[in-house]
Structures are given as structure tokens and as C-alpha cells.
Amino acid sequence: MKIHLGGSSRQSLVVARGALDAALKGAAAPAASELSSHLFFAAEVFATNTSLRRAFTDSSRDASSKNALVKDLFGSKISPAASGLLSAIANLRWSAAGDLVVILEQLAIEAEASAANIAGELDRLEAEFFSVSRLVADNFELRKALVGHGSADSKGALISELLSKGAAASTVKLAEALVTSLRGRSIEAAFADYLTGLANRRNRLIALVRVATEISDAQKVRLAAALEKQVGQPISVNIQIDPSILGGVSVKFADDLVDGSISNRLAGAGRALVGQN
């Protein structure tokens, strides 16, 4: 399932993810998880207050007034990293005020995924969370308890008790956040949204490297180390052998493409020649 956002909000999500990357760079797993908690908290604040949400997304308000709003709303309740990220998000443009909540939730999910990645548990988190989604879908009594009229606290306690003995801490945390903040969604739709967030963060932590011929293990290690230094957390490198690039290397990472292949340089030279004629 894809998150449905209008054009301005889609672009804002791209920019917000870049700001999240910057906030997470070099962070330890606990700090990344704390940022996730504070983003979930902010999402809930805006989800339950229409006037605040509209004020935060109002394009006619200047940046300083929105930054003041962040300070007034959250103050010392959230970390400086979360406060800075919210201030950056406040200056983006939105197709609808409600999109703010969707994007904050997605960023919170991705921040927790990064915490798991830093701890070496992202694969485990993704596998466990998918298993939880199937468990809920296949167990009528459990689903009924999680979507019924019980309090959010009781639902969170139920899923925590169910998972805490064997699941990763990040799995338990995201499952609790999900069942306590459905916000009118079916639980299946909420699981789809969370799994989308996990997949998006996974995609931002994979570098696709295209080369004309196989590169050595030492070259792979050096490339991974260079990218990890840039990102500030572990990444995966996928090598694709593509003889059509002739030589050199093309690296696609997150929203960036660095194409140093010979075929790209030849194409660039051809465009330059055409431009001269």
C-alpha cells in the first residue's frame, strides 16, 4: 500500500525524509528510538487538535511564528533533535492539513527502523512486524480486542504482553504505537502504513551500485565504508553487473544518483556536441 498524499505534501515528505536523515546521522540506537517516540507524540498532538494542525500548516504564517508554535507546544517535552526537525517541517507546504499527521507518523516509523538498523536488527524488525500483522489478521478474538471499544492503554498493554517475551524492542514499540493510534483506519490499513514506512527506510539504507564487471570484496568494503560515513549508520550495498555502462561506476542511494559510468559521460558529451550545433 502507498501513502496517498497530494502533490505539495508528497514533495514535503521527500524534504522531511532528508531532514530526518540529517537528524539521525551518527546517532546511537537509543537516540534514534527517542526521536521516534517524540515524533509519534507530535503526531498525536496534531491529530487530536484541528486548530493547531491548521496553524502549523498555514502557508500564510511566517517561519518565525511557526517555530515559536513548536516551542510553545512542545518545549522540553521533546529532544532538541525532534524540535529542530519539527521546525524544519513547519516551513514546508501541504496539500491538506491532515497530511501533517500522516508524514509525522511515517517519519516516526522510519526513525525507529533506523534505531533497529543501528542495532543490527532491521531484518528482524521487518520480519516480526509482518508476522504480527498476519497474527492479528488471522486471529478473530485478538483483532476484536484491538479494534474494539477498550481504552488505548489496554490495547497497548495487550499487544505488549503478547509480544514482549520474544519480539525485538522496536517491534513491540511500533505495535503499541499502531494499536493505540488507529485514527479511523482499519487495523489492516494501519499495518500497511507501518510496513510502508519500514520499507521506505530500508530503501534509504541500500545503495544500488552498477558496474560493468565484478568488483573485488575489498572495493565493496571501501564503498560501503564511504557511504556509511556519509549517512552515519550501517547501509547495504547491492552490486549489479551491467555491461552497458562500459566502465566506471553508477551509485544510486536514497534520492541521489552519482553516475560516473563511461556510458553516461559519453551521453553527456553527445548532448554537449548537439548543443554546440
Image: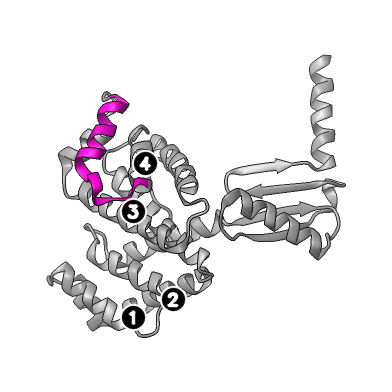
Residue type at mark 1: give it: Leu
Residue at image point 69% right, 57% down: 224
Q: Amino acid at mark 3?
A: Glu
Expressed as whole percent of the image width and height from the top left, the position of residue 251 reads: 70, 48
Classed neighbour count for the residue bearing mark 3: other residues with Cα under 10 Å, few (<14), some (14–19), many (≥20): many
Q: Amino acid at mark 2?
A: Glu
Q: Are marks 1 and 3 in contact (CB under 8 Å)?
A: no
Q: Position of residue 14 (x, y in %)?
A: 47, 42
Contact (Cβ within 8 Å) of mark 4 with mark 2: no
Which mark is first along the chain, 2 or 1? 2
Question: Residue 13, can we see it?
Answer: yes
Residue 84 numbered mark, or none: 4
Q: Secondary structure at mark 1?
A: helix
Q: Are marks 1 and 2 in contact (CB under 8 Å)?
A: yes
Q: Position of residue 53 (x, y in %)?
A: 22, 40
Q: Is residue 237 above or below residue 103?
A: below
Above/below status of 94 relative to 98: above
User: Residue at the location (62% across, 55% down)?
Assistant: 228
Q: Earlier along the polypeptide chain: callout 1 or callout 3?
A: 3
Q: Which residue is mark 2?
A: 128
In the image, residue 69 lies at what x, y percent?
A: 23, 35
Residue placed under numbered mark 3 in the picture: 105
Specify which label sits upstream in the sequence, 3 or 4.
4
Locate residue 8: give its quadrant.
top left
Few, some or many C-alpha atoms within 10 Å of disc 1 (few <14, some 14-19, many ≥20)?
A: some
Q: Image point 81% across, 33% down: which residue?
A: 267
Location of mark 1 (residue): 163
Q: Tell me the magenta residue range.
A: 62-80
